[in-house]
Image (tube, helix red, strand yellow):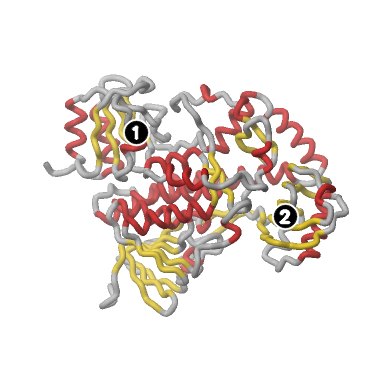
Amino acid sequence: MQIPDTPLYDVIIAGAGPVGLFLACELRLAGRSVLVLEKARHPHSPLKSLPFGLRGLSVPTIESFDRRGLLERLKAGAASRETPAGAHWMQQQRRPGGHFAGIQFFHDQIDATQWPYRLPGPIGSMAAEMASIEAVLAIRAEALGAEIRRGRGVETLRQSTDGVTVETAGETVQGRWLVGCDGGRSSVRKAAGIGFTGTDPEFTGYSVQVELADPALLEPGRHYTPTGMYTYAAPGTIAMVDFDGGAAHRRELARDHVEAVLRRVSGVDLTVTALLLATTWTDRACQATDYRAGRVLLAGDAAHIHSPLGGQGLNLGLGDAMNLGWKLAATIRGDAPAGLLDSYSTERHPVGAQILDWSRAQVGLMRPSRSSRALEAVVRDLINTRDGATYFAERVWGVSLRYDLGGSHPLVGRSAPDFELGDGTRLSALLRTGKGLLLDFGARPSLQALARRWRGRINYVASEAKERLGLIALLVRPDGVVAWAGEQAPDNEEASQAAARWFGEPNAN
């Protein structure tokens, strides 16, 4: 029941990080009222800036930003900044594509022809600063009409059959739905009683900026040692892993402690003269047992945490937001088919579980043991082959992402190729409205009639394309995932079933 004189928002989002802000953009694009509550009073943090704020964006993330018209803004911000000193990998002659537990693969090794449902052209990840990502998303969310209140975290919540009441900083706010995007220690997840299970940490990871008495004693690059692993970029940017069971995580970091760990991990008698910036992290890997409890949902680190190895945590969370936004909006609007919102957890939970195992596998290679070093040598040999580099790129870049949606065509469940149409328009631009898309390469009356039945939820575009991968038409969900694809005379029954599955009952007329 709504409290008198208290505004009722369609959705309250806890957390104004990239995941919460991107979700706010998606919901506002669909016309839903959104309130974002953020515990921190200010968005600024030195850990969000270079060098520690550098994040690699995967292919699905890049595609999502492009489909919402945000990619060029992000690229503009990235181009205005110099390469950070901490990015030692940028100083190499070969263009690195990523790594697995510190073992690099390179673009010149990758065979993209093994991905037959992707169009030829540049592919890979890009780097962006966390502060820039948040700034671009915050500007976009507020421009669309989202309300962001900082210095207000979720303290308590109460659910009813038709909404959620939240207490925040002495104020009561109400929403039809609440989404926790408030990090690994999510107060929303705990208050909703959602389980969080997984594996305990084996190490404490450190990211530090220091001044060294003799920086030349430390060899730049990434190195395995008998006690751990470290990465060094002169003159004083260091990441290191100490296999202490996570004992030092979240402790107050003093200069002498960092110096002792650095000496132990590197095996070099170094002197740290000043500690400028430091943070810790671990390889603890946990996942919510479900991403929904009643009218409370989870996304991002609130739903899953793991080590930052491979840089996939941010991408995983942004993928949650892209998947959830349109489904939640349709549910609120009242035209969602049965089970649409439940498909969020059904689709994203396995993706999260896979990323957690990918993180755990890297820890297995990093352990300071003879067996791990032997296994590392095997993986290093494999990753140096063309097939091996292609496999690791496929996993790290997110190219292999596919939801199990059924359907007779192998493209169903995958990201829609960015077809270039006859007038130069690309498919990505056709998804800017946040609606579904029926792309017809032949202007077929039967498909035009199908689109009219879901007018307002599906946009219809008829055009030839420079390369269409043998397709005659495809139906794309608002998140860019292919719901139906046809290679022959269109199977209207199958196309209609796909439309009804994802967009609900057709219009009455």
- Residue placed furthest toward the left: 509
- Left or right? Give the position of 119 relative to 287: left
Residue placed at 84% from the left, 58% from the top?
271
**Circle 1 sits in a helix, a strand or a loop, which is it?**
helix
The residue at 19%/41% (across/down) is 455
Identify the mark nearer the N-term, 2 or 1.
2
Q: Is residue 416 left or right of residue 188?
A: left
Can the viewer see residue 190? no
Considering the numbered disc 2 on the image, is that residue within a helix, a strand or a loop?
loop
**Callout 2 environment at 10 Å: few (<14), some (14 to 19), or many (20+)?**
many
* Residue 371, horizontal then vertical, whole percent: 79, 40
The residue under label 1 is 427
Quadrant in the rendering for residue 161: bottom left
**Dot 2 and dot 1 residues touching (CB under 8 Å):** no
Q: Which image quarter holds the C terminus?
A: top left
Q: Position of residue 280 (x, y in %)?
A: 67, 59
Pick the front one: 222 or 79: 79
Q: Which residue is mark 2?
A: 203
Quarter of the image where the N terminus is located: bottom left
Task: Report whether 257 appears left or right of 197.
Answer: right
Report the amino acid beneath label 1.
Leu
Q: Amino acid at mark 2?
A: Phe
Q: Nearer the viewer, residue 428 or 399?
A: 428
Between residues 295 and 219, which one lies in front from this camera angle? 219
Res. 417 in view: yes
- Can you give x and y, in whole percent of width and height, for residue 488 in the image? 30, 19
Instruction: Please tell me whether mark 2 or mark 1 is closer to you in this view.
Output: 1
